[in-house]
Image (cartoon, rainbow, N blue to C red):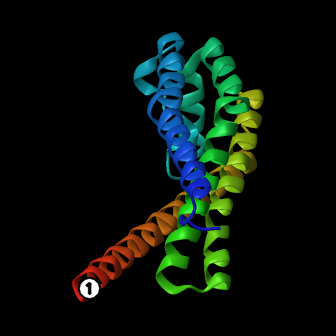
Amino acid sequence: MHLSSKTSWMTWSVLFILFLFMGGYVMPHAAESIMNIAKDASCFAPLDIQMGVSLEDAHKSLDCSGPEGRELYRTIEKREDVFYPIIAGLLFSFTLYSLSFFCYKKQKLSLSLALVPFIITLADLTENYFVINLIDQFPSLNPETVKAMSSVNKVKWVFLFMTLGFVAYFSVVSLIRIFNKRNRQ
């Protein structure tokens, strides 16, 4: 399925609106809510938005959030931060499939590329699991849990940047094809 039908455009539009709402309002509001009740908001940084986290960074951030902040952080990881990666994964998957199919008309290539954003989704959800475990372990954080969370975090960011690169590439190729097609007419 690519963006040639009305239904496809509607699906993509709904996913895009949900993505903007989650990324522009829900998640920033959630982080702000933690900071408002944190023991020391100046040193709190959500673990899942950092690229790679050390044991010291994890301990500092969770300590700064305070008991109420950690409890809210756990709730957000279980609720809001479950929907956001799923919405983002579906949006990026649908976008990559549609753009690559438009450019090259190769379904196998398009389907393969559409799987890349699901790696981000799986990594993000796995990262949430580790963050919740770290919150539960605090103040005695297991270095192996931090290391696992940090590794999954790095996978998420690498595949996110890869996906954004693919989207940018196929967008440029699509625009060139559209421009060339209009110039020939």
Residue drawn at 64 percent across, 58 percent down: 151
Quadrant where the C terminus sits is bottom left
Q: Residue 144 versus residue 109: which sits nearer the camera? A: 109
Residue 142: x and y in percent read 75, 41
Q: Quadrant of residue 2?
A: bottom right
Q: Residue furthest front?
A: 185
Residue drawn at 52 percent across, 16 percent down: 33
> Which residue position is annotated with label 1?
185
Q: Quadrant of residue 74?
A: top right
Q: Residue 148 versus residue 119: which sits nearer the camera? A: 119
**Quick check: 25 left or right of 1?**
left
**Quick check: 141 left or right of 23?**
right
Q: Is residue 67 above or below residue 110?
A: above
Residue drawn at 66 percent across, 77 percent down: 112
Quadrant where the N terminus sits is bottom right
**Quick check: 4 left or right of 124?**
left
Residue 65: x and y in percent read 56, 20
Q: Is residue 73 above or below residue 111?
A: above
Residue 162: x and y in percent read 50, 69
Residue 140 seen in this snapshot:
no
Tell me the SS state at disc 1. Answer: loop
Residue 182 seen in this snapshot:
yes
